[in-house]
Amino acid sequence: RHLGHRRNEFVLSSKGGQAIDGHPDWSPGSVSASIEQSLRRTRSERIDVYFLHSCPVEVLRRGDLQDTLDQAVAAGKIGVAGYSGDNGHLAFAVDSGRFAAIETSINVADQWNLRSVVGHRPELGVIAKRPIANAPWRFVDQPRGNYAELYWQRLRELQLDPGNLAWAEFALRFTAYAPGVHCAIVGTAKLANLRRIVEAAGRGPLPPALLADIDRAW
């Protein structure tokens, strides 16, 4: 309603692959139905980047979902096919050569994807998710069962020091300017938070000394 008439002012991405409209998980029908649903809901004629979301390796090996995405590209319904996921699944997807973009976890406490995949594939479009590592510094004690729990543990072991920066800015600037990253997902329901995020990112990459400290810790 608010963006449909401004469609050419931004890049639109969506993701799917799970069961939808009676089609089972990871079936060509579920991918096609998901694309059609996204087109309807966004009142758009195309999705610029469509990601298979967390699709496991054993499904990727079949190749039929990639064929479905290629058909959608040929029909002009999507611009490029992407893959959303991490670690071994991500590496397989990228090595297959069937995807032009990825969405993956990249942050100060999660760097395998950055070092093992993104850094080796400069031709990929890259969206970094979890750029501030789910903000584990919010918790004094280990947050059991929270998304931030693993990253809380890792930060304790890495013993990183943000210096005179707030943790959120330290983490965001690391991710947003990591080599090969084109954009980072930051979610918020508050306009004031969004403004702070934009201001922090606008201050540019972290100083080389901080980046060296992070590299050594990792």
Image (tube, rainbow, N blue to C red):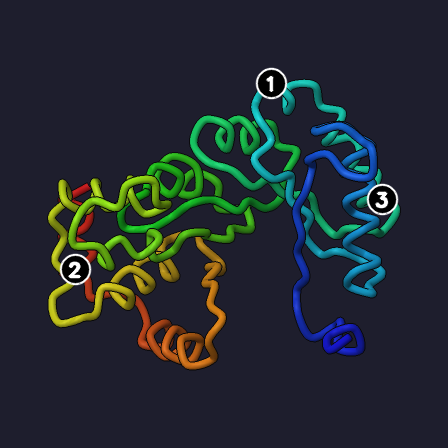
C-alpha gap between disc 2 and disc 1? 40 Å
- Image position, residue 33 (x, y; %): 82, 42
Q: Identify the residue at image location x=34%, y=40%.
A: 145
Q: Secondary structure at mark 2?
A: helix
- The quadrant in which residue 207 appears is bottom left
- The quadrant in which residue 206 appears is bottom left
| Amino acid type indicated by mark 3 | Ala
C-alpha gap between disc 3 and disc 2? 45 Å
Q: Identify the residue at image location x=33%, y=63%.
A: 172
Query: Which comes sooner in the sequence, label 3 or label 2?
Result: 3
Rendered-image quadrant of the N terminus: bottom right
Give neighbour class at mark 3: few <14, some 14-19, many 20+ (Cα, 10 Å).
Answer: few
The residue under label 2 is: 210
Residue 29 versus residue 214 in the image, above or below: above
User: 7 or 26, which is in the foreground?
Assistant: 26
The residue under label 1 is: 58
| Amino acid type indicated by mark 1 | Glu
The residue under label 3 is: 74
